[in-house]
Image (tube, rainbow, N blue to C red):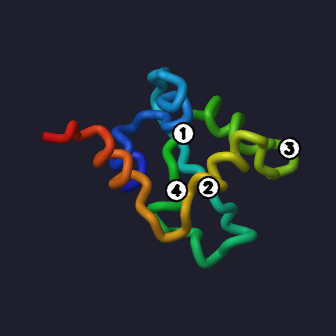
Amino acid sequence: MKMLRLDGYKCQVAKMYGGNEEANTVHHIYPADEYPQYAWCDWNLISVSQKGHNKLENRQTGELTELGKMLQERTIPGVDWRKARRKKQIPPR
């Protein structure tokens, strides 16, 4: 899938904490059932491992966890966080 490739097949949740896990799932930052208009927007999709997905979403209820809510609050609809992150990694001249 495109998102897994864009994220280098690496779990972005693990990466936030300095880890390095293989991603095999794509998580909707803004849940698709509540925000269908964002369901297939690249900025709303993030590659995660099963462990990372469990940290973002309660697998029993489908509700976002505190970490999932925090990620949602930090994600601005329509803004490509991948591009913003890459800009931060490029040292200024």
Amino acid carrying label 1: it is Val
Lower sequence index among marks 2 and 4: 2
Amino acid carrying label 3: it is Gln
Lower sequence index among marks 2 and 3: 2
Lower sequence index among marks 1 and 2: 2
- Find numbered disc 3 in the image and state the secondary structure of the residue it sits on: loop
Q: Which residue is mark 4?
A: 45
Lower sequence index among marks 3 and 1: 1
Residue 53 picture location, percent across and down:
65, 39
- Find numbered disc 2 in the image and state the secondary structure of the residue it sits on: loop
Estimate the spatial distance between the alpha carbons at disc 3 and disc 4, rounded to whole Å.
Answer: 21 Å
Query: Left or right of 41: which side holds 6?
Result: left
Q: Residue furthest left?
A: 93
Residue 39 picture location, percent across and down:
58, 69
Q: Which mark is residue 90?
A: none
Which corner quadrant holds the C terminus?
A: top left
Q: Which mark is residue 60?
A: 3
Q: Nearer the viewer, mark 1 or mark 2?
A: 2
Residue 78 picture location, percent across and down:
48, 70
Asked if 59 appears above or below 36 in the picture, the reply is: above
Estimate the spatial distance between the alpha carbons at disc 3 and disc 1, rounded to whole Å.
Answer: 18 Å
Q: Which mark is residue 29?
A: 2
Q: Which residue is mark 1?
A: 48
